[in-house]
Image (cartoon, rainbow, N blue to C red):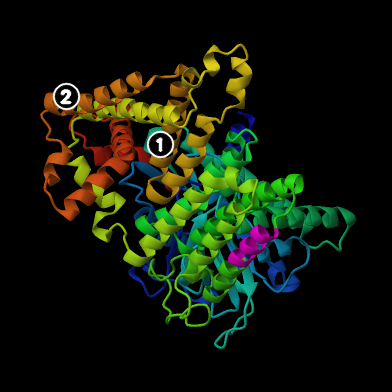
Amino acid sequence: MKAAALSLALLPALVAGEQATWCDKKDACATVKGGLPKPAWWEKELKKMQPACEEEGATCHQWTSLLSDKAKGVLDNVLTTVETKIMEGSKTKQRNRVLRRNSQMDELYLSAPRNSEGSDRVFITPHIDGFLGWLPFFTAYRCVYGLTGPHETVTIQPMRDPDEQEVNVGPGDFTCFDYNREIHWIEHRAQANATLDDRMVLKLHFYEFPAIFSYIGDAFGDANAQYNFFARAAFLASQFPDKDIISRLIARGINGITLFGGSAEAVFGYMNMGIALILISAARGKGQTMLTIAGTCHFAVYILAFVFRSVRLGMLIRDAVAMKSISALLLTGTYAWECAKTGVNLKSFAVAVSGFAFSAYAFMQLGPALTYFGQELGQVVSDPVTAFPYGTVPHPMTLGSIVGLTGLRLHPTYGPKFHANYLLHVALYLTVLGLEVTGASVPAGMSYDSTYTEFMKFHQDAGNVIAHLFTTALGVAGVIGMAINYFGLNPSLNGAANDAKKTGAARAMTSPTLIAFGWSWILVRYTVPDEDVAYLTVALFVVTTYLVSKLQWSYMTCFAALAIGMGGQELAHHVSGEMPYLNSYAEVTPEAALTFILHNVWLLPFEIRAAVNVATAAYLPVRRGRSADRAWAWARDRHSLT
């Protein structure tokens, strides 16, 4: 389990980009009570407090707590505008979360993107601001609110959709990102209408957590603030490295860590590293097993992104390429190892190289945005690509990949070992092709949130909600047990339990717990946009799989658990007097069939959310007659948002 423990530190975010917020000054979300002062007013305010800003020509900061009373009044109105937009985007209230201001971190900030000396280089290097992204359930926001412009400083946010990946934050514009998780940087870009070389912005900060954690939520905000104070002190000490050797060493340390950490997240992603490590470890060193459980992850990314369409394009491209590279490395490694042992087969090698090269060429012609469903997600508008092989060879990437896999299968000794994986990979490529041809996806009107709203109409009783959570978990345990038995991972059914070397045999077996860990993270990442529920769903899957595998349930026990779980749900509805959700769409229509599928896919997340809401209402001091909304407001307002 060491791999699992290490991987926990590499899984900083479950939900694919929901925390990101962008607002253009022309949109209603940008309206500030009393209006926004002119840029010259803000420049005067900063330089009055920081005369050095005018002299040194580098980045300059001033805590907003030290601004004039008039500036603080304007700031409060700006904060209200920004927090309203955050709460709307992250569905703070609907998900029983609390958003608070972290004003001790707020600053008036003048950036100098042309300055690449010392720690100023950090801002033009891909980086993540904080380091607490490994903490589940808690989110910190940094919002960059524009005060001056037009200028030539562009904020790069590569994990977002194309219209937000490169933004010029002018007066009244603002962008918010996860302080501990989202990669970003700034660049100097020549703009035809620019009148300023640098830009002045407000850096505003918030933190958010489940309402049930109200008594410890402020500790998270304070931890981010203390880290920010430390980072700012280190930055100021190294901003001008020519002053002394200490400044130079600190600057090199900051820039080195930023370059390595930012590049790793931008190119591969810490979550993807964690998932790959977990699944490769689960195989216990067996090459073909690695291919089965870790080498097929990219197909899950393709299928889930295409069907559910709830991921940002930038993150999808990064994740798809990362997972595809894992598959390619495993295919190459296992094939090369076999060739080293038994010799190279020229026919196999030639067919494999030709097929994969043809697929790679087709990818380059199409480009990553179109390859990974930019048009289907509504983010890219493009004319049909007609350059060869498109317009000549149908579906060239899929065809080339299948030819390449066939080449591997032709190897006289590797081929038989690879046969099962060959059939699996080909079947998955054809599945993705079928989705692309048919365009099958979840309709916008049947999204996670809209389906949950319908589901909750039939789960209002607290007793029914809690009973459903336990009965569903029992049913899930039964299904997991059947899967463990079917794939031969139960020692009591494959003879290992009666073997004198049963302990060693069990250790050598593929780990169902690690498989559940890695794959459940992938599944919820692209299907469950409720972050708290996503974390809890993964935890429940992992714990359930661990217990079932340890107890070594027989098929009979698994069937009994599933039957009791399903029967318990019906009994809970009967006792509570609430009609089952299934009865509301019990018709023989395509829409009813799709609703049934989504109901079952999201059943456990829905019941976890309902149970969290019940627990939150019970935990908070709700006086008689106080509604759930007012209970949430009590949790939010226990401490002043200012």
Real-space Cα separation, disc 1 to disc 2, in angstroms:
24 Å
**Is residue 17 something one can see in this rendering?**
no
Please state the horizontal and vertical placement of residue 467, each as a whole percent of the image.
Answer: 25, 25
Give above or below for 598 relative to 407.
above
Q: Amino acid at mark 1?
A: Thr
Q: Out of 240 and 596, give the one closest to the viewer.
A: 596
- What kind of element bears circle 2? helix
Q: Amino acid at mark 2?
A: Leu
Judging by the rendered image, the residue that carries numbered circle 1 is: 537
Picture quadrant of residue 302: bottom left
- Please state if 198 lies on the left or on the right of 434 as rendered: right
- Name the quarter where the N terminus is drawn: top right
Please state the horizontal and vertical placement of residue 402, each as a whole percent of the image.
Answer: 52, 60
Q: Main secondary structure of the magenta part?
A: helix
Q: Residue at x 64, y 68 (%)?
A: 111
Q: Is-magenta flag for residue 441?
A: no
- Please state if 70 lies on the left or on the right of 449 as rendered: right
Q: Out of 172 and 512, give the one closest to the viewer.
A: 512
Q: Which mark is residue 74?
A: none
- Please state if 428 lies on the left or on the right of 62 as rendered: left
Picture quadrant of residue 239: bottom right
The residue at the far bottom in this view is 192
Q: Out of 477 and 167, give the one closest to the viewer.
A: 477
- What kind of element bears circle 1? helix
**Residue density around tag 1, few if under 14, some if 14–19, many if 20 or more, within 10 Å:** many
Judging by the rendered image, the residue that carries numbered circle 2 is: 571
Please state the horizontal and vertical placement of residue 6, each as a whole percent of the image.
Answer: 63, 36
The residue at the far right in this view is 245
Region of the chain picked out in magenta, as a range: 346-356
